[in-house]
Image (cartoon, coloured by chain):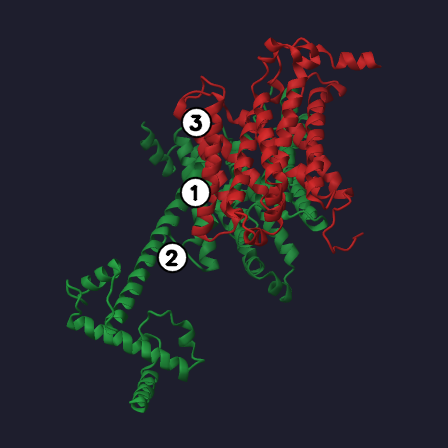
Chain colours: A green, B red
């Protein structure tokens, strides 16, 4: 079976029960990571989750050692998850404690906690490697994730925990939105901001510990960050943003797991991250709202409107035009002939432009508080910003003024 | 007593422990120096981001040149660090996202790409792997030809020093010179960027130079000690030093002291510590150095004379 065939059959969950379960588990993990990450991103605390994820390592090591000391083989996933949750909770508390009690800023606290916990975790791993050389613990797989040889019980654990985390996000979505956007207001409405913040980070912690096995602790933070950043390109509203973020995370997890199942040399964690990054790239380039292409087009359209408008005003004042772009735009829209003389259409348009300028000048005098004046960008036709009654009034005043000066 | 010490620090020490200890110290200090300024500029996590992207840089250099010699590796890693900084800036502007999220997005993606390339290309002929990149191999940087302290003046033996040692020494001198020469500019632009701009300091260029210095320190140290200790040394000694004093000069001094202590104690505990508990095996020196720097920082957080914010009430 070729890679593509296998990929397609795995995508359709036809490539065996085990890889189907892994794919579904990774999808659910991505879904919960995407939705939890959206809130953390909006609260501007994306990198706190980096500290949380690196801080899991000592917990994994200690849990393994304790389980071995009690006679089990130490690889029981729920036990390792509990251990990692405890140590990353300690890491999280330390970040908060350092930021609150000392003059150090949060970024320094994050950097210190993540590197020190990770370093200590590595020390524990080297101890484990020597103490049970016969039983290769495979704990290194927690660094970068691995789904090869995953047990069905492990995949089920991950799938169930992922679904639970997603449900938890759904239940807390309102207070978390409130806190993410306006913590002071949230506090006045009786929301306990500190508890909601803790809940948010608790969610990141849950996602991290269940993601250890599939994505690994170094890269799990990507699943919390990339989907919300991607979603932000498509919408300005919270609800849709969380939905899109969850979707991007879910699809990335699913496709990544399938790819890695189809080709054993592809490590699961990195490929999931790169699929998510692919979604980010597509969004950053092509999103109609904030994508690079849309921004460039918008900029170009704006530039053309400015040049057209300035050209028309110059025509009405009978000033010569030197700017190449202005000349080109006017010529192409049939406002001037090749030799630079205004056509009939050009004269009409330029008269309209200069009349509108005069109308605005008058409007600023007689309606100084009108909201249209504040919103005016110098380009929008006056008919679109004022009622015909207002324009008639302005015209009447203009005529009066002309009569007075004549 | 003196005799005991001399035996302890005898030929075996010179051969097995002198160079790793020195390399550890040089790496720690080279990272701690720029770390001071990053910390004060609230860019502590730039070090984190850069040390993650060193791996893809090295892998890219390997894919291009097909060898693992030092110079292309360092160039590749340096290039990757600069690419990462530029990418972070683009993501920040384009997506209008906070710097932390932009940073997290870029460094995880680049790291993932590095790991992926490493796994799918055939690198079995050479010794680069993820494990090595994360942990370094400080323990293996021994001075094989040393026969004792007298080797320090023996040119033949000196020629067989691990190349990381002179390289790191050079990098440390370079970074030290950068900081000494631009001390005034760095200091002013760190504390008051607007004022620095007003008196004609090119702040943009200076922060870029600082990032480059950081990248150079990260790359040189990474090669010897792996990426964890690099992050720990960028953050922990300067952060601990920040809690000791209100003066920049003293802060830099303290950070050098803390970095040196972490490197020495970390190496000693990793090599000899397990023996005190009856275990014949050593533990990861890089991990232990990071741990010690964390313990120093914890002590500074608890007892540092300047640990409070200005105006913060003494709390129970």
For label 3, count other residues whose C-alpha is less than 10 Å away and answer few (under 14), some (14-19) or many (20+): many
Q: Which residue is mark 2?
A: A289
Q: Are marks 3 and 1 on the same chain?
A: no
Q: Identify the image quadrant of the N terminus of chain A.
A: top left
Can residue A265 be seen at all in this image of the molecule? no
- Which of the two residues, A133 or A73, is positioned nearer the viewer here? A133
The residue lying at 55 percent from left, 60 percent from top is A181
Instruction: Give how far across and how far down residue B24 sits, in percent.
Output: 64, 25
Q: Which residue is mark 1?
A: A276
Query: Which label is found at residue A217?
Result: none
Instruction: Give how far across and how far down residue A387 sits, in percent.
Output: 34, 81
Numbered circles on residues, count = 3
Q: Secondary structure at mark 2?
A: loop
Q: Is residue B221 above or below residue B157?
A: below
Q: Tell me the subunit letter for badge 3.
A: B
Q: Are marks 3 and 2 on the same chain?
A: no
Question: Which of the 4 image quarters holds residue B146?
Answer: top right
- Which of the two residues, A359 or A267, is positioned nearer the viewer here? A359
Q: Secondary structure at mark 3?
A: helix
Tell me the CA gap for discs 1 and 2: 19 Å
């Amino acid at each position: 079976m070729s890679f593509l065939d296998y990929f397609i059959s795995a995508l359709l969950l036809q490539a065996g029960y085990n890889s189907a379960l892994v794919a579904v588990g990774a999808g659910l993990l991505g879904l919960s990571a995407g939705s939890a990450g959206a809130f953390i991103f909006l609260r501007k605390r994306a990198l706190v989750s980096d500290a949380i994820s690196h801080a899991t390592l000592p917990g994994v090591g200690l849990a393994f050692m304790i389980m071995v000391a009690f006679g089990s083989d130490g690889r029981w996933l729920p036990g390792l998850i509990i251990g990692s949750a405890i140590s990353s909770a300690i890491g999280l508390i330390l970040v908060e404690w350092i930021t609150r009690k000392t003059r150090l800023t949060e970024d320094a606290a994050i950097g210190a906690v993540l590197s020190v916990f990770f370093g200590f975790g590595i020390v524990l791993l080297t101890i484990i490697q020597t103490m049970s050389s016969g039983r290769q613990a495979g704990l290194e797989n927690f660094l970068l994730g691995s789904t090869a040889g995953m047990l069905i019980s492990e995949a089920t654990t991950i799938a169930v925990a992922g679904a639970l985390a997603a449900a938890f996000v759904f239940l807390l979505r309102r207070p978390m939105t409130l806190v993410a956007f306006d913590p002071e207001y949230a506090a006045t409405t009786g929301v306990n901001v500190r508890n909601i913040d803790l809940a948010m980070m608790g969610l990141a912690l849950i996602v991290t510990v269940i993601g250890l096995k599939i994505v690994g602790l170094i890269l799990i933070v990507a699943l919390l960050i990339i989907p919300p950043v991607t979603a932000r390109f498509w919408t300005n509203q919270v609800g849709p943003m969380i939905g899109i973020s969850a979707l991007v995370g879910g699809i990335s997890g699913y496709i990544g797991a399938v790819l890695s199942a189809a080709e054993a040399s592809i490590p699961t964690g990195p490929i999931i991250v790169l699929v998510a990054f692919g979604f980010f790239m597509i969004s950053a380039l092509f999103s109609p709202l904030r994508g690079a292409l849309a921004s460039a087009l918008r900029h170009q359209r704006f530039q053309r409107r400015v040049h057209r408008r300035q050209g028309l005003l110059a025509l009405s004042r009978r000033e010569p035009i030197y700017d190449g772009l202005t000349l080109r735009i006017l010529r192409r829209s049939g406002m001037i002939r090749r030799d630079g003389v205004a056509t009939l259409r050009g004269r009409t348009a330029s008269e309209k432009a200069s009349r509108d300028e005069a109308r605005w000048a008058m409007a600023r005098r007689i309606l100084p508080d009108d909201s249209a004046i504040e919103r005016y960008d110098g380009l929008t036709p006056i008919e679109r910003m004022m009622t015909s009654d207002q324009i008639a009034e302005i015209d009447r005043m203009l005529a009066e003024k002309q009569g007075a000066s004549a | 007593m003196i005799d005991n010490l001399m035996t302890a620090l005898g030929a075996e020490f010179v051969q097995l422990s002198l160079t790793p200890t020195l390399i550890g110290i040089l790496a720690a200090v080279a990272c701690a120096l720029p770390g001071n300024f990053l910390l004060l500029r609230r860019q502590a996590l730039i070090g984190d981001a850069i040390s993650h992207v060193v791996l893809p840089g090295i892998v890219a250099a390997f894919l291009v040149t097909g060898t693992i010699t030092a110079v292309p590796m360092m160039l590749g890693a340096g290039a990757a660090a600069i690419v990462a900084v530029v990418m972070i800036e683009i993501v920040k502007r384009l997506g209008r996202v906070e710097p932390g999220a932009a940073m997290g997005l870029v460094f995880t993606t680049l790291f993932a790409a590095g790991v992926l390339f490493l796994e799918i290309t055939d690198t079995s002929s050479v010794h680069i792997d993820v494990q090595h990149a994360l942990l370094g191999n400080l323990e293996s940087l021994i001075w094989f030809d040393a026969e004792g302290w007298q080797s320090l003046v023996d040119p033949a033996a000196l020629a067989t020093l691990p190349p990381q040692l002179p390289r790191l020494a050079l990098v440390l001198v370079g970074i030290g010179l950068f900081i000494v020469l631009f001390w005034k500019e760095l200091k002013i632009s760190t504390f008051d960027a607007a004022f620095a701009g007003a008196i004609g300091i090119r702040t943009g260029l200076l922060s870029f130079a600082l990032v480059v210095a950081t990248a150079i320190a990260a790359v040189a140290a990474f090669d010897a000690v792996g990426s964890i200790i690099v992050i720990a040394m960028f953050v922990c000694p300067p952060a601990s030093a920040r809690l000791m004093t209100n003066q920049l000069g003293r802060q830099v001094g303290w950070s050098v002291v803390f970095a040196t202590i972490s490197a020495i104690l970390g190496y000693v505990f990793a090599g000899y510590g397990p023996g005190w508990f009856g275990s014949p095996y050593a533990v990861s020196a890089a991990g232990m150095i990071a741990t010690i720097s964390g313990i120093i920082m914890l002590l500074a957080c608890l007892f540092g004379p300047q640990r409070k914010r200005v105006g913060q009430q003494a709390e129970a």
